[in-house]
């Protein structure tokens, strides 16, 4: 027969073991829950960092885009200023050629200034535009108004295209031009200006002599 004390001790031991197992299970469950909470907190922190980095990138992209738009507007304003002056002068030059008029000293000075401004604009295709405009005017025939109208239309078209998008304008005309062709055309224009400048100097000397001559 089993001793009652032994049974009681065994029951207590079994209860204690069961209690220990339950406590261990709860402890493990708490540990897993804590680890899960830590994992979620880490995941939330990582997502917050990603959201912050994305927001910073978007803000930076918007800033860069805004700056680029401002520069593009400023460039276009400068192109409009120089191109409109250039277009007007050479359109008038086409009309002068039809009528057989010669350039005045003021006209020649303005032409020299335009050549400097267009080439110093720093914009792509500036020399190509100058070449196309000079070529258009060179086709004008004295007494033939239709040639002047055609030149004016060509000048207007090219200056407008250059103002709107100088890169595309240059690319579209790339096959029509070589460096040698551009240099030759512009050199002819420079030679014409130098001839006009020499004429200005001769006229100035003549005027000075006439002014100083006794009555």
Image (cartoon, rainbow, N blue to C red):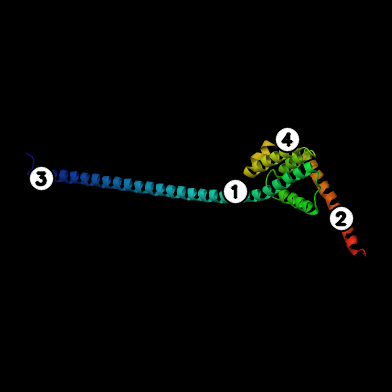
Residue farthest toward the right in the current orientation of the protein: 214
Work out whether mark 2 precedes mark 4 in sequence or the reverse, and give the earlier one.
4
Mark number displayed over residue 72: 1
**Numbered circles on residues, count:** 4
Q: Classify the position of the C terminus by image quarter.
A: bottom right
Identity of the residue drawn at 87% across and 59% down: 207
* Disc 4/disc 3 C-alpha distance (Å): 111 Å
Q: Secondary structure at mark 1?
A: helix
Work out whether mark 4 precedes mark 3 in sequence or the reverse, and give the earlier one.
3
- Provide the residue designation for mark 3: 8
* Disc 3/disc 2 C-alpha distance (Å): 138 Å
Work out whether mark 2 precedes mark 1 in sequence or the reverse, and give the earlier one.
1
Position of residue 129 measured from the top left corner of the image (x, y, whole percent): 71, 42
Identity of the residue drawn at 62% across and 48% down: 76
Work out whether mark 4 precedes mark 1 in sequence or the reverse, and give the earlier one.
1
- Provide the residue designation for mark 4: 176
Position of residue 154 measured from the top left corner of the image (x, y, whole percent): 70, 39
Question: In this view of the protein, which residue sits in the foreground, 65 or 157?
Answer: 157
Q: Are marks 3 and 1 in contact (CB under 8 Å)?
A: no
* Disc 2/disc 4 C-alpha distance (Å): 40 Å
Name the side, left or right, on which 205 lies relative to 74.
right
């Amino acid at each position: 027969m089993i001793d009652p004390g032994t049974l009681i001790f065994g029951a207590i031991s079994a209860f204690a073991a069961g209690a220990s197992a339950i406590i261990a299970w709860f402890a493990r469950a708490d540990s897993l829950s804590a680890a899960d909470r830590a994992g979620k907190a880490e995941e939330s922190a990582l997502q917050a960092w990603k959201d912050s980095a994305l927001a910073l990138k978007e803000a930076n992209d918007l800033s860069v885009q805004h700056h680029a738009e401002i520069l593009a507007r400023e460039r276009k304003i400068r192109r409009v200023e120089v191109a409109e002056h250039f277009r007007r002068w050479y359109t008038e030059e086409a009309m002068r050629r039809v009528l057989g008029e010669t350039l005045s000293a003021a006209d020649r000075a303005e032409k020299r200034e335009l050549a400097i401004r267009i080439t110093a604009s720093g914009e792509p295709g500036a020399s190509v535009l100058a070449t196309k405009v000079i070529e258009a005017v060179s086709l004008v025939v004295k007494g033939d108004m239709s040639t002047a109208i055609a030149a004016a239309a060509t000048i207007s078209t090219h200056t407008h295209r250059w103002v709107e998008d100088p890169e595309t304008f240059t690319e579209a005309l790339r096959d029509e031009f070589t460096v040698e062709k551009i240099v030759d055309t512009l050199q002819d224009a420079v030679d014409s200006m130098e001839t006009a400048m020499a004429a200005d100097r001769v006229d100035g000397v003549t005027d000075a002599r006439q002014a100083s001559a006794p009555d």
